[in-house]
Amino acid sequence: MLDKYGRDINYLRISLTDRCNLRCVYCMPEEGVEKACHEDVLRYEEIIKIVQTAAKLGIKKIRYTGGEPLILRNIDQLIYETSIIPGIEDIAITTNGISLLEKADELKKAGLKRVNISLDTLKEDKYRMITRGGELKKVLSAIEKCISIGLTPVKINTVLLKGINDDEIEDLINLTKDMPVNIRFIELMPIGEGEKLYSDNFISNDEVIESLTGLIPMVSKEGSTAKLYTKKGYKGTIGFISPLSCKFCSSCNRIRLTSVGTIKPCLHSENEINIKEVVNDELGLRKVLKDVIYNKPAEHKLNEEGKSESHRKMYEIGG
């Protein structure tokens, strides 16, 4: 379905929970978060109803996110139920990778196509510091596992933090030399906990690209948020996602569903539409989704406002 600006909105990102087993410094407070009431969180049956209706409106791609989606029980069943919905062509998850190694096989069998794995450093002590307690070896083993069973392309999401992990950019790029992975450097955004770090730790991707040598530009897929490169002889790709220094709003093809049943037409907009009350009314649900898609904002105002207009934190919205 097209929005009023002619963009084909075919991608729905669904946050399954605002809970996580890590406490990354740019995402979640060290003490954790107050859990959403159980009765407020969408049940799997409700999510499937929403996806079924969205698919009839042209949604083809689903990404399940969190918080951390793999902390939930029976997520493989949710993925299977999603995979058999007519019109859904691609199912992916965004995960921190901590629990992925032991679940990768069952997820692929259920119908999962791809994974995005968060990885901000290759140094164990720094990984524990950024994530406040995570085990790096679990994530690295999960990456190897996904490659071995064909959950590819594996995308690795790295939030760049000036003075913290910007000294590892070349090391992270070198992962793509012998492994068919897509490393994607993401600019720190002034939203939630990231707003606290932004003034001291933001570094633009333009600055990073200028500092690198040997990058070979590639053609990005339609709707891609990343500017893509590779290096001669490398198996993988290097991407740069720049929501601040280089907006990609004009080609944005996605809407988002939070775990408590609100639709966000734009990640950084304060506007949210509660669809929980119409989830069992297909005609009502269809009307709300059509209105949300058609009236998706032209662009965010991060540059103008200096911070996100969203009232939610990233762990509530999903990656």
Image (cartoon, rainbow, N blue to C red):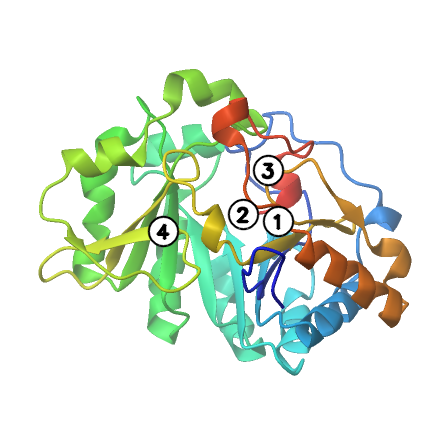
Label drawn at residue 201: none
Is the N terminus in the top left, top right, bottom left or bottom right quadrant?
bottom right
- Determine if residue 185 is in view: yes
How far is disc 2 from disc 4 in space, using C-alphas?
14 Å
Which quadrant holds residue 36?
Answer: top right
How far is disc 4 from disc 1 in space, using C-alphas?
21 Å
Total marks in image: 4
Q: Secondary structure at mark 1?
A: loop
Residue 173 image position (x, y, % from top left): 22, 47
Q: Nearer the viewer, mark 4 or mark 1?
A: 4
The residue at the point 69 percent across, 49 percent down is: 17
Residue tagged 1: 66
How far is disc 2 from disc 1 in space, using C-alphas?
7 Å
11 relative to 292 in the view: left or right: left
- Determine if residue 96 is in view: no
Q: Are marks 4 and 1 in contact (CB under 8 Å)?
A: no
Give the residue type at disc 1: Gly
49 relative to 95 in the view: left or right: right
Disc nearer the start of the sequence (3/4): 4
221 relative to 281 in the view: left or right: left
The residue at the point 65 percent across, 82 percent down is: 84
How far is disc 3 from disc 4 in space, using C-alphas?
18 Å
Give the residue type at disc 2: Gly
Label drawn at residue 226: 4
Disc nearer the start of the sequence (3/2): 3
Label drawn at residue 319: 2
Q: Residues within 10 Å of mark 4 (few under 14, many from 20)?
A: some
Give the residue type at disc 4: Ala
Residue 185 image position (x, y, % from top left): 34, 43
Residue tagged 3: 268
